[in-house]
Image (spheres, rainbow, N blue to C red):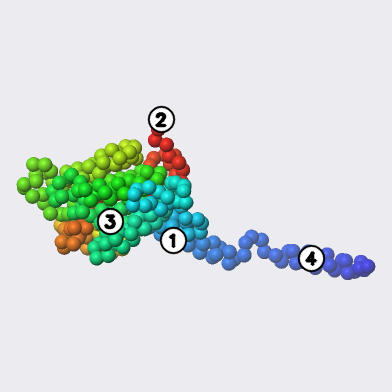
């Protein structure tokens, strides 16, 4: 049992120790908090200037889980061990179209497939070569395009929940005089081609509210996305026809419509039909990837 002297000394020492403790947070904590605040502001800035790619995000998510979607055969019907399943997200749609492109390469090893795909913040984009899809200067679809739509594109739209934009694009060459009685400029021609594909899809059973028709003329060259990725601060809405804009911070000359149509190959790539499976926020309120969507009253 402790003696009275020990207890008295213990209490005195405890009191002295308590009095020696400084009030408030340790000095290093303020520096640490400042550093965390700066890091947070840095990552917020990165997020603000970056373009989110919904397809890549979904691919990352899907890599941890089971694969969605179904394989679509050339007959235009889906088959997954006897069951039909919807294509519920853009990553699954991308996988389906990549498989289609690989099949096309096997069927025609020496030629380039008439379609390619790319991703953007807007959604998943399928580019169809314009020279493959339409006669020069006309908006009437070639049989090859109808077959491609029937066997590959329309079945995928029917199995998905996405709204789809169909847009016509052109190169920078002016409309020849002999065609101006039908289409005054490339704006009219590109819009007519987009509308032509949309009408065909509606005839094949795609509900009209799911489809958008657009025409961009020469003002959305295919190379514009790669330029945006290389220069995140560049605004494509500042694209000019001939005289380049100088970046305020980079000091670099930004591309122009003519520079993105500098070669015959670039012009050929720019003459295209672009089918975009839109990221769900473009659908309007209430629509989410993976939700079933009804277009009936």
- Horizontal arrangement in the rendering, residue 3 relative to residue 289 (left or right): right
The residue tagged 4 is 14
Give the number of the mark in front: 2 or 4: 2
How crowded pointer 2 is (Cα within 10 Å; few <14, some 14-19, many 20+) is rated as few
- Horizontal arrangement in the rendering, residue 95 relative to residue 177 (left or right): right
Compare marks 2 and 3 and give the one earlier in the sequence: 3
How crowded pointer 3 is (Cα within 10 Å; few <14, some 14-19, many 20+) is rated as many
Q: Are marks 2 and 3 in contact (CB under 8 Å)?
A: no
Compare marks 4 and 1 and give the one earlier in the sequence: 4
- How far apart are labels 1 and 2 at the CA level? 48 Å
Q: Which residue shows up at 58% across the image and 67% down it?
A: 28
Give the number of the mark in front: 2 or 3: 3
Residue 297, numbered label: 2
Compare marks 1 and 3 and give the one earlier in the sequence: 1
Q: Where is the N terminus found, in terms of image quarters? A: bottom right
Q: Which residue shows up at 46% across the image and 43% down it?
A: 291
Could you say where residue 215 lies in the image, as x and y percent from the top left?
Answer: 22, 45
The residue tagged 1 is 42
Q: Are marks 1 and 3 in contact (CB under 8 Å)?
A: no
- How far apart are labels 2 and 4 at the CA level? 78 Å
- How far apart are labels 1 and 3 at the CA level? 39 Å
Give the number of the mark in front: 4 or 1: 1
The residue tagged 3 is 115
Give the number of the mark in front: 1 or 3: 3
Q: Which residue shows up at 59% across the image and 66% down it?
A: 27
């Amino acid at each position: 049992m402790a003696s009275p002297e020990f207890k008295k000394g213990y209490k005195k020492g405890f009191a002295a120790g308590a009095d020696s403790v400084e009030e408030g947070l340790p000095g290093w904590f303020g520096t640490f908090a400042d550093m965390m605040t700066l890091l947070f502001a840095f990552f917020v800035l990165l997020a603000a200037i970056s373009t989110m790619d919904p397809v890549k995000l979904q691919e990352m998510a899907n890599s941890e889980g089971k694969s969605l979607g179904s394989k679509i055969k050339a007959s235009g019907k889906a088959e997954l061990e006897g069951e039909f399943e919807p294509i519920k997200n853009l990553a699954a749609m991308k996988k389906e179209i990549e498989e289609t492109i690989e099949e096309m390469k096997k069927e025609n090893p020496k030629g380039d497939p008439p379609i390619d795909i790319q991703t953007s913040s807007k959604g998943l984009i399928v580019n169809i070569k314009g020279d493959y899809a339409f006669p020069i200067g006309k908006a009437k679809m070639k049989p090859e395009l109808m077959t491609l739509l029937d066997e590959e594109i329309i079945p995928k739209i029917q199995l998905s929940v996405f709204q789809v934009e169909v847009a016509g694009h052109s190169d920078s060459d002016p409309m020849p005089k002999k065609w101006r009685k039908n289409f005054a400029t490339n704006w009219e021609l590109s819009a007519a081609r987009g509308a032509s594909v949309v009408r065909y899809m509606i005839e094949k059973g795609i509900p009209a509210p799911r489809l958008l028709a657009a025409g961009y003329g020469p003002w959305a060259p295919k190379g514009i996305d790669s330029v945006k990725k290389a220069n995140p601060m560049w605004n494509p809405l500042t694209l000019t026809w001939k005289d380049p804009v100088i970046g305020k911070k980079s000091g670099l000359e930004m591309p122009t419509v003519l520079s993105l149509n500098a070669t015959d190959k670039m012009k050929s790539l720019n003459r295209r039909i672009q089918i975009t499976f839109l990221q769900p926020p473009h659908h309007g309120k209430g629509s989410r990837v993976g939700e079933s969507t009804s277009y009936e009253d």
